[in-house]
Image (tube, coloured by chain):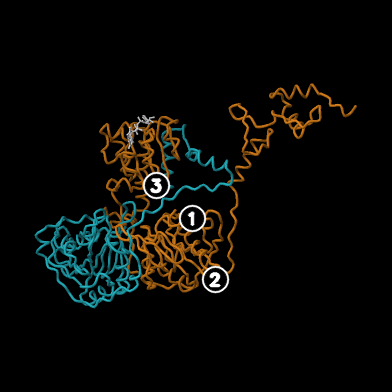
Amino acid sequence: MTDIPRRDPRTEWILRNRLHPQYDEVVAANSGPVRGPTGLLRWNPHAVGFVGPNGIKRIDRSAGLTGGAGGLSSRAKRRSAQVEVELPLHRIEQPDFYVAVVVDLAGGRLSGHDKDILGQAHQLVKAMEGEGAVVAIALGEAREATFDTAGADRLVHLTEVHGQPLTGYCPEQKLAVLEAVESELAPRYWLFPDSVHGGADIGSRLAARLGERPAVHAWQVDAEHTVCRGGSQLTDWHRPTARVMLLAEECALPIDETRHEAKSIELSSIPRVTPQIEDLGQVEVDPSKIALAEAEFILSAGNGVRDWHQFHTVATALGATEGASRVAVDDGNMPRFRQVGATGTWVTARVYVAVGISGAIQHMQGIGRCDKVVAINLDDGCDMTKRADLSVIGDSQGILAELLRLAEARQSGTESESPAESTEEERHVA
Amino acid sequence: MSPDSFPNSLSNPDLKVASLISVGQHPKSGRARRASQDARAVELGLKMTGSASRLIHVGGGDETGLRQYLGMGLPEITLLKADGRADAVPILASYLKEQPADIVLSGIHAEQGEASGMVPYLLAEHLGWPIVPRIADIQKVEDGFAEVLQALPRGQRRLLRVQLPFIATVDNAAPDARQYAFGPARRGLMNGVAVYAPVDEARLDWQENPAKPRPKRLNVVKAKSAADRFKAATAKPQGQGGKVIRDGTDREKAEAIMELLIAEGVVR
Ligand SMILES: Cc1cc2nc3c(=O)[nH]c(=O)nc-3n(C[C@H](O)[C@H](O)[C@H](O)COP(=O)(O)OP(=O)(O)OC[C@H]3O[C@@H](n4cnc5c(N)ncnc54)[C@H](O)[C@@H]3O)c2cc1C
């Protein structure tokens, strides 16, 4: 009697109706292996997948057929697990030797170049006998710098030396720190990024001070051999690997599979120096004279700009270099050399503000290397708002007018707050 | 840019400026010419002290390249005669000890050979002088100090004050060198000085080959499963969910933009 499977018409009825208030409960009770009337294992196709936001049933096969109403949540769980995955920690207790990497920390962040050099340092450590540690030397303020995932086993991070902050141009103080590292840790190699952000300068100084002959523009390095680019990029020098190296971009792959300790090292004594070079601060540069390709901050105008005089005033007030889309140029509102895009200039700005630009692919190609894009546009579905980190939807004229008012308020505000700072010297115009 | 454009109040008749020059090469044809950064250094020297500024070259004296510097309006080049394999630094250091200068200018990198850019640094270390890299201009020289404009990336400039004597390397941001004239280039003197020039031993067993193109880095996706690799290959790079502000007054929208500009540090 008991082993005759019995049908339950009410449950079946609920199961047929997805909108029934008890549907979820009944499905949950019935899930799990179900035996059919003949004792065969039955698979309930209705319990597979989940209903997507548009009401269509979705089956996520990549989720390992967990099935059931929990499909969505389990997928979300998986995704968050993927984000938080902990890389294995690479631990070094007692290093036999050190490889020093002096990072640029341009703008307080580890650049791709810095990370490549750290990757190169680990390659050199692996090629040598014994257990070595990569010590990253960061001089100056650091923002969002992730030394552990970038591959620093040890870290020397100083923001000031003898009460003197390491900001601006202070190569002599920085050199003193490096000399202290040299005398305390005696690194097997000194690696620097061969960059205009100060790496090439400080590396050359250290090489001259230590009397080491550096390998400069090195782009292929192993424990024995180094290939360096020669003058005018026309020759390669094959030479033995040097102790001090200034490495080109993309010389090695960055670290991405391990996490490192980034254990802080305190230097016991740093020699005092009397700097012969004094930094009088950055001078104001006329933004319209900066080449578009290397400008840091661009305000770009497109077909959606109505008042051109206003646009130029805003650019001046914000201190932005002006750019334009092709339509703005073709209509004669902007000069040809201001055009951004495939047939214009490929820009590298850190902040790019697009005013009334729809974001045609030819324009997007030109701003591929910009960090932050801001869009001002009437149309919230245009391609520029999809690319932008911040989009404001509205009429360009009104928003530019408010922006101008804010910029002017800010200028007069800062001037009245600190009149002593804006002395003659600092307001040189290059 | 005539030599007179350096304001009289700033120019000092006793100021001694020397430029270190080398033979450059055209980046495409490889033909010998004046090196562009060195020519800018010469231009800066001309601006400060006119034709009293000196030119110093270490080497065998390749006429065509060097004479172009003379064509910029200078009467002579001091040619410290040395083999092409000699190390220029000790030669220059001993010469500058005998014939002192207040400001020594040079390019950042040579256009030929190793182009390590170390000569000015080593020279500074030998002489105990400060070195200022990548300058765009020297704005004034007063009371034994010079105010130097240094070129930073992205067209920015920084003002530095440095004690004389010093060495500076001249950036491409410095004013363009003037055109050179053929007549003065022919008439100028190459004043050869015999010096003791030891051979640069370390470099003898290095090899110099034509440059190989560098491999481009590929975006290799390290994924565990085929599904992940497929996703990485086909997924459209999405804008990482930018913020969209639809409502609010123009004022609020402008404030949101201003906030971002200030956070990024582009509006000071
Ligand atoms: C071979 C070729 C090469 C090209 N090369 C380039 C190139 O190098 N650079 C380039 O830029 N283009 C280039 N183009 C042109 C490109 O395809 C687009 O036509 C152009 O970029 C569009 O410019 P736009 O966004 O300014 O104008 P539109 O596409 O007209 O967009 C105007 C935008 O402004 C908005 N708008 C209108 N009024 C207002 C308002 N009052 N307030 C706020 N927003 C408003 C609209 O919503 C719209 O999104 C090229 C085209 C071709 C065929």
Instruction: For label 3, count other residues whose C-alpha is less than 10 Å away and answer few (under 14), some (14-19) or many (20+).
Output: some
Secondary structure beneath label 1: loop
For residue A240, which quarter of the picture? Answer: bottom left
Residue B88 image point, x, y percent = 27, 71
Residue B250 image point, x, y percent = 41, 34
Q: Please, what is the three-letter code of the amino acid marked with disc 3?
A: Arg
Q: Is residue B85 above or below residue A159?
A: below
Q: Please, what is the three-letter code of the amino acid marked with disc 2?
A: Asp
For marks 1 and 3, give the CA distance. 22 Å
State the residue position of label 1.
A254
For ligand 1, give the image quadrant: top left
Disc 3 chain ID: A
Residue A355 image point, x, y percent = 36, 36
State the residue position of label 2.
A96
For marks 1 and 2, give the CA distance. 23 Å
Secondary structure beneath label 3: loop
Q: Please, what is the three-letter code of the amino acid marked with disc 1?
A: Pro
Whether residue A164 sits left or right of residue B150 in the image: it is right
Q: Which chain is orange?
A: A
**Numbered tag placed on residue A168 in the rendering:** none
State the residue position of label 3.
A350
